[in-house]
Amino acid sequence: MSNDSVKKNVPIIALLGIVVLVLLGSSFYFIHKTPHPQADKKQTNITPTKPAWTVKTSEFTVTPTLAPGQKSNYIYYINAVTATTKPGTLVLHPSDAGKTFSVPTKSVILLDFSTINSGKNFTYVSFSPQNIFKPSGKPVPFALPKNYLGGYVVYRIGIGKITVTQAQ
């Protein structure tokens, strides 16, 4: 090939190169411009998850025979809700251990351990980050039925736990 023929073809080759670059660039632009469903923020739906304390815990029953020196523990989970219904009385028995109870505010919770040794030799304690129970560490402000271990009044919305432990 002579120099003259190369000089004549340079503009054509340059023009073809520019056309190819424009076509590649525009196709790249349109491929990345089209919205993808996973990238669309408006379609993202966040579903609220339930708090851990509303999930019903596994059933827990005390083994009928305990090892020597082993103590029985009974744990009750309380979810205090707005009083949409009339406040009532919730009586907790040893067989209810491990369950979660939704209780309206101003309700009374009683601990009935009369079926086990007439409710003797048990201690109980409550815990709540929102301090939902009254009394807190004091005797109940009302008379308990015979052989009942103790009780609380739920006076605030929140979560709590009541633990009953067999004393020595």
Image: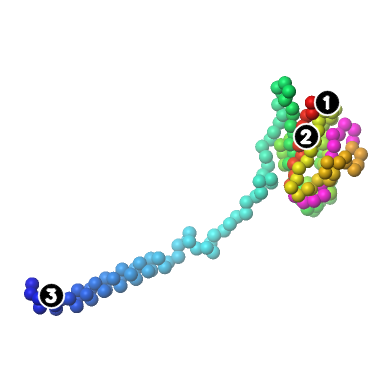
- For this view, does 41 lie left or right of residue 15? right
Residue named by callout 2: 164
Secondary structure of residue under mark 1: helix
Q: Dot 3: within a 10 Å radius of its alpha carbon, few (fewer than 14), some, or many (20 or more) residues? A: few
Quadrant where the image shows the C terminus: top right
Residue 133 placed where, x, y %? 81, 45
Confirm or deny contact between disc 3 and disc 1 (CB under 8 A): no
Magenta segment, which residues?
145-158
Indicate the secondary structure of the residue bearing disc 2.
Answer: strand
Asked if the magenta segment contains residue 40, the reply would be: no
User: Which amino acid type is marked by label 1?
Assistant: Asn
At horizontal 60% and vertical 55% (from top left) the residue drawn is: 47
- Residue at 28% across, 71% down: 21
Q: Which mark is residue 6?
A: 3
Q: Is residue 152 left or right of residue 101?
A: right
The structure residue drawn at horizontal position 14% and vertical position 78%, both measured from the top left corner, is 8
User: Mark 3 and mark 2 in contact (Cβ < 8 Å)?
Assistant: no
Sequence-wise first label, 1 or 2: 1
Question: Left or right: 108 with respect to 99?
Answer: right
Name the residue: 38% across, 65% down: 31
Q: Nearer the viewer, residue 139 or 88?
A: 139
Please, which residue is most extreme toward the right here?
A: 143
| Three-letter amino acid code at the position of disc 2 | Val
- How far from the left and from the top, in percent, is residue 10? 17, 76
Q: Which residue is mark 1?
A: 117
